[in-house]
Amino acid sequence: MKTSAFDALKERIESRDLTIAVIGLGYVGLPLATAFSEVGFRVVGIDVDEKKVRLVNRGISYIEDMASERLRSLVDQGFLRATSQFDALDTCDAVSICVPTPLRKTGAPDISHILSAADAIAEHLHPGMIVVLESTTYPGTTTEVILPRFHREAENLEVGQDFFLCFSPERVDPGRKDWTTKNTPKVMGGVTPECLRVGRMLYESVIESVVPVSSTEAAELTKLVENTFRAVNIGLANEVLLICDKLGLNAWEVVEAAGTKPFGFMKFLPGPGLGGHCIPVDPQYLSWKLRTLGYTARFIELATEINTAMPKYWVGCVQDVLNEEGKPLRGSNILVVGVAYKRDVGDLRESPALDILTLLRDKGAKINYHDPYVPVFKLDELEMVSVADLDAALAEADCVLIATDHTSYDWPALHKQARLVVDTRATLGQEQDAIMRYAWAGVRG
C-alpha cells in the first residue's frame, strides 16, 4: 500500500471524517452501527427489512440489549441513519457485513445473504474502501467467495492497495451486560497485511482490543472453534446427564462438584439441547467444510447427535412420569415454561423448547406455554400464544416442563403449584425434590 494513501486514510479515521455502512441491522449490526456512531463516525445502516429501517430512523430499538433513548440520540444528531437502498454505498468509505448465515435443511451452509451483500458492494466498490465481513462462515469464504466477486466487478482495483478486505467475526452474547461490542476482544484477519493494518486501524477506534491473526481463514476458523468448543462440551454435559440417569445419580451435583476443581476443568451444564444463533449452527459450518475435504469431524458430529436428541429425551421423561400417575401423554395437558433459547431474552432462534413443543403435539398432548419474553410465536405450522394466567395454567396442567430458567419466575412457588414437574434446568438446584431415575432433573410427583 502506498504510504501516502495509508496516511490519508489514517488521518480520516483519526478525525472521524469517514462514512461507514453496516449491512444487516440485527443483533450484531445495529449495536456495531451504534458503537461507530457514538465515537463520531457517520454511519448508514443498510437492511432489506423496511420495518427495521423505519424503526431505526425513528430512533426505536428492536434489540433487547439497546435502549431506544441511546439510538434516538444518535439519529437526532445525524450520526446514524438507515436505508434499504444499496446506492448509499457510493458515499461510504467502509463497510461491515453483519448478515445472518443459517443452515439449509440439508445441513449445508446458507451464505446467500453474504453473497447478496458482496454483490451489492462489488457494484459500488471504489478506491480506498474498507470491507469487513463479520458474519459467521466457513474458512475460505472471504478469499474464495467475496474477493473474486470484487475483482470481477472492479478489475482495475487491487486488494491491499486500492481496497481492503478483512474478516472479523462477531462475538455477541444476547442479554449480557458485562461484555459489549466495545469491550469484547475482536479477532481480525486481512487478505493482505495492508488490509489487516487498515482494518485494525478502523476497529481500534471503537473497540478496546483487536486481536490480529495471520489470515482471514484463521479468523474464520477461530469463530467456529469458539462455538464448537461450547457445543462439544455441552454435548458432554448432556451425556453426563444420560449417564447419571442410568446410574441413579444427580447430574447437577456431579457437575457442580467437578467444577470446584481450580484447574483443568470448565463447568458446562446439561439442559434441553442447544439453542441460539451460533452454537447449534457454527459447528455444522466447520463439519460441512471438512466433509468437502474428505474428513469427518467426529467430535462435532457426535456432540450434534447427543444435543439434538435431548428434546426427545425430555419428552420421554414427561411420558414416563405421567405413566407413573396412570395417565397417557396423549390427551394430557402439558405446560412448557420458557421457550426462549436462554434465560432473560426473547430470542427463539434454534430453541430446543420449540422441538419439545412439536414432539409433545405430535404425540397427542394438549400443549400450552408461558414465557414473559415471548408473547407469541409462529414456527412453520405451529403458532402459539403465551398463556395469560400462569397460575391458572399451572393448576390445569397435568405436567409442567421447564425449558428456560428466566429469573423472573418464582421457582419454589412454581414447583409447589404444579402437579408434576420435568425440570430441564434444575431450577431449585441440587437439593430440589426429584426422582433419582430421572437424573435428579427436577422430575417429581
Image: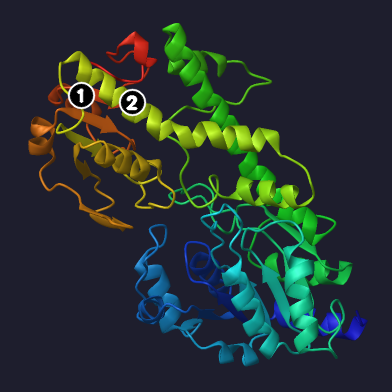
Q: Would residue 19 appear left or right of 155 to someone viewing this image?
A: left
Q: Would residue 270 appear left or right of 142 to someone viewing this image?
A: left
Front residue of 65/209: it is 65
The residue carrying pointer 2 sits among few (fewer than 14), some (14 to 19) or many (20 or more) residues within 10 Å by Cα, namely some
Residue 265 in view, yes or no = yes
Q: Secondary structure at mark 2?
A: helix
Rendered image quadrant of residue 383? bottom left
Q: Residue at x 62, y 84 (%)?
A: 120
What is the residue that sits farthest to the right in this orientation? 2
Quadrant housing the C terminus: top left
Q: Please, is residue 32 above or below residue 139 in the view?
A: below
In three-dimensional space, the C-alpha distance between marks 1 and 2, rounded to whole angstroms, equals: 20 Å
Q: Please, is residue 230 above or below residue 30 in the view?
A: above
Front residue of 163/2: it is 163
Q: Residue at x 43, y 31 (%)?
A: 310
Q: Earlier in the sequence, mark 1 or mark 2?
A: 2
Quadrant housing the N terminus: bottom right
Circle 2 residue: 316
Circle 1 residue: 415
Q: Residue at x 55, y 30 (%)?
A: 235
**Tag 1: residue type?**
His
Residue 280 in picture, x, y percent from top left = 53, 45
Give the label, 1 or 2, closer to the camera. Answer: 2
Rendered image quadrant of residue 428? top left
